[in-house]
Image (cartoon, rainbow, N blue to C red):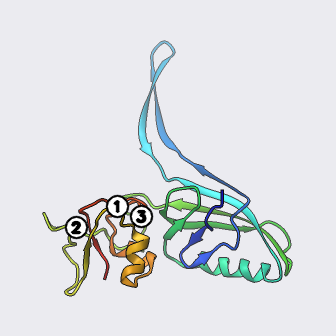
Amino acid sequence: MILSPMRFKDFVWPHNPRVYSISYERKLAVHKIPFGRHYLQSLGQTRRVLQGEGEFVGERAYDTFKELASVFYEETPGVLVHPVWMTTTVWFAALELRQQPRRDYVAYSFQFWEVVDGGASTTLSARTAETAGTGQAADAPQGAQWHTVVRGDTLWALAARYGVGLEKLIQLNPAIRNPNLIYVGQRVRVK
């Protein structure tokens, strides 16, 4: 099976990381009951952490790592498209150089934290409220263009059809949590 390359914002990995994992966490409270008993209370799920390690090899290995590092320095979350995990909006939380870099070989590790509903980010604009029945954002500017999803449509295909970058299309539609899942009849803002 051939996997597509991993992408974050405008950086595309020349080859997928060697190792990656995803961590889920639920916060629990323990309540003590007399005579040695206790019960657990779920305080809810926390962020998912997507992490891994890999190498860049070849003539431009160190330059490729520097390109990835420049994406890390951007102070905004972005869309992570992973060949195995679902596509999600994340913060690039950590990037580590794993050894003395060489021009032709760099070992690195990375960590992304998923953006959770309700904000989790001071740099993201608040999700726009939708007006009843129309599916259009209440604060959409005049001249906004919408597409009604038909069977077979994907966000990738709509981005290509309307000449809009996928990341821009996702930003225009903050109510779409999973870019891999849109429904027939759903209205998608394309401009």
Q: Position of residue 8 (x, y in %)?
A: 56, 71
Residue 110 visible to the viewer: yes
Q: Are marks 3 and 1 in contact (CB under 8 Å)?
A: yes
Single out the residue that lies furthest toward the left: 133
Q: Which residue is mark 2?
A: 129
Single out the residue that lies furthest toward the front: 152
Residue 182: mark: 1
Question: Dot 3 lies on which element?
Answer: loop
Image-based side of 105 in relation to 51, left or right? right
Q: CA distance from mark 3 to mark 2?
A: 19 Å
Image quadrant occupied by the C terminus: bottom left
Nearest the camera: 155 or 22?
A: 155
Q: Amino acid at mark 1?
A: Ile
Q: Which residue is mark 3?
A: 179
Please name the residue shown 18% across and 73% down the image. 138
Q: CA distance from mark 3 to mark 1?
A: 7 Å
Image-based side of 176 in relation to 52, left or right? left
Residue 122 visible to the viewer: no
* Quadrant in the picture for residue 20: bottom right
Q: CA distance from mark 2 to mark 1?
A: 18 Å
Question: Dot 1 lies on which element?
Answer: loop
* Quadrant in the picture for residue 131: bottom left
